[in-house]
Amino acid sequence: MSVFRYGRGATVMCAVISSILWPVGPQVSLAKVVCVRVTSEHTADTSDLGRFRQFSQWKDKTGNDLAIAIWQYLCGYETGVYHFDEILDGSDPFDEYATVRDPLKILNVYNMGYCGIFGPVLDGIFQGVGFEQGRSFGLVRWNHCATEVWYDNAWHYFDMDVRGILLDGSGTVVSLEEAQRNRSLWVSPPKHIEPFFPNEPDKGKVFDIYHDSPVNRYYRWFEGTHTMDFSLRQGESFTRWRTPQGGRWHHLPRYSREKWVRDLILTPPVGMKPNHRDFTPWNHGNGLFHYAPNLSSKSTDFQDGVYAAENLAPGEQGLHLVHAGNAEAVFEIFTPYIIVAKINDIDDPGDDAEASVVTLETALPASLAVSLDHGLTWKQAETVESGRKKAVDLTSLVKGTYGYLLRLSASGAEKQAALQSLSIDTWVQVAPISLPRLKHGENHLQFDVGDRYGLRTIPMLVRPDTSNPKDLEKYVVTLPENYDPGQHTSRILGDATLRLAAPVGMKIAWLSVGAGFRTHQGEQAAKTDNRIAYAVGAPQDFKEIYRSHVPTWVSHWRYNWDTDIRLDQPAEVIYLKFHGDPGLNTMRACLHLLPKDPPSMHVRITHIYDISGRQQERTVDLAEPGAYTIPCDGDPENVSVRIAAPSK
């Protein structure tokens, strides 16, 4: 029996979606746009730390000048992060592993945090732009966390949370040790630049706290495998707003229980915002992925956008069955921004809504299912009756994630109409500082495609939950022999091997990998023996890419290590072997996949902004990466930017 089928691929892991058949038949012209970015001259590119390093304000600086310029930008009123509270995402119940300390997430998704996030994140940013080494530290008496970075053969203290640095007479940033020793640097500094601890009027009192406080030093407390790359299919747009849109944010139940956080959230506009209003004009932003493909045979949208399909083909009025029997279509929703719901009652998570809404018009009863693990397991969502248009709200299944697979299943007669229309609206949280900005005058902007290595790849995040044996066993070759999910500080002792497989028809070009390890401390740190290795195609002949060399100044029980693996040749399967001694606690990867068909570069970009109370809109169509300009004859209030891949 011949079956008409399309598909991007199957599963990323060991299992397959058994009910899906993959493409061996018709070839179609696909026009997905991958690794999309729009940047402006006024805002650093936060989509990658290598690109962040190239911002015009500091691309030619080094050492002390570079560190100060980046720190000032991240403490700036328009460009900086702000203090809120702890930020957590993911399924791990242990806060140490759920707390967001990935620089790309903070710069692009959240825009906020607290000192225990900002200390390691700034460390990660400094190391990401090329500084040799860094560390965050905990000041015990102030319950505070900040950063030191190493350059010019010395340590230098930077505080992104309370916004201050201390300079010596030559303008060089001093170390934490010097800050603890020298009172005059605080009360009568020989030199200083703004900001200078603006919320601390009595700098002498701050020195007294620093002077007597024990210090805990943290080694690589940040993570680094997240990506900000994303794709747009034909018929899909992504709009990002600088301001909250209808009360949508990543809400944690603990925010409702903490009075000051609860009061802050309920202060209009409702949602996450700074508790130091003078630090920033921003609260949080939002984004909306809107996917509405033309399913008729007059368009190639379905072929371009479907992840996998069996026994379905476009017809005059939408999808129809090719043969009598069962039919399925799988669509992928991937976002580097966390999916968020409309928070109706902050005390009732069950009242959240509209995180991702699927609206469909069917001619046959259709069953909807969702997978959060690339097709390894599925959860039934709803069954939609035929003959009417219905919106299915997937909030309870997908909020707080970074994407999912949606499976639509139906059964009918040969040539019977199945699905007339489909749209998927997915809301996300966005950091306002990451968006391209327009200012008075002629604004120079840039549209680019490509990942950090210049390849047009499609990312796939893989994060096994090591706190849950049932989840972990979906990803590993075998469960580790010495594994105790309840032992949070050392869950795995010895080896754990992940199998990472590209979807059918695709190959892995490169991948980011990372892990959270336990470490020995102080003089015992040299005994730490944590490792990462990889093998291509089969779990043999592993090549070691990391072996621990933990510094003796570390005084915390855990750290992270993240790195890229660039393959000599694209591969279908990669094995990652992690070794923990004294312990392995978390594992993560981001595969960067080569699509089976050359992607397009055609986009439509729309900037919306207000000048003197009048809303203005500028749209440009670009068929390839390049520069464009938008003149503003007044001071614009930036509202939103939309990138769309038009239907074909």
Image (cartoon, grey):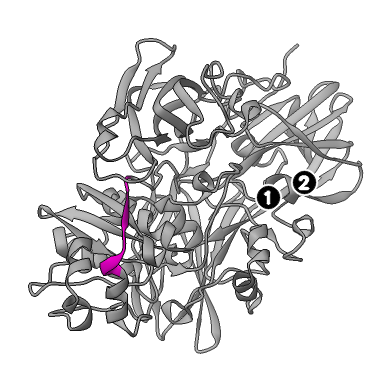
Q: What residue type is labelled 1?
A: Ala
* Mark 1 residue element: loop
- Tell me where residue 85 appears, x and y as whole percent: 52, 64
Side of 110 relative to 437 (left or right): right
Residue at 63% of width from left, 50% of height from top?
Answer: 400
The residue labelled by disc 2 is: 421
Q: Where is residue 76 in the image (x, y as percent from the top left)?
A: 35, 73
Residue 292 disc label: 1
* Residue 9, magenta (yes or no): no
Mark-to-mark CA distance, 1 and 2: 8 Å
Q: Left or right: 30 with respect to 298?
A: left
Q: Do the residues labelled 1 and 2 touch (CB within 8 Å)?
A: yes
Q: Which of marks 1 and 2 is nearer the N terminus?
A: 1
On-image quarter of the N terminus: top right
Magenta residues, as a range? 210-219
Determine if residue 177 is in view. Answer: yes
Q: What residue type is labelled 2?
A: Ser
* Whether residue 624 is situated above or below residue 64 in the rendered picture: above
Density class for disc 1 (Cα within 10 Å; few <14, some 14-19, many ≥20) is: many
Asked if residue 217 is among those painted magenta in the image, a careful observer would answer yes
**Which residue, as the protein is rendered here, is positioned at the far left?**
170
Q: Residues within 10 Å of mark 2 (few under 14, many from 20)?
A: some
Using the image, determine if residue 632 lies above or below residue 625: below
Residue sitting at x 46%, y 53%: 105
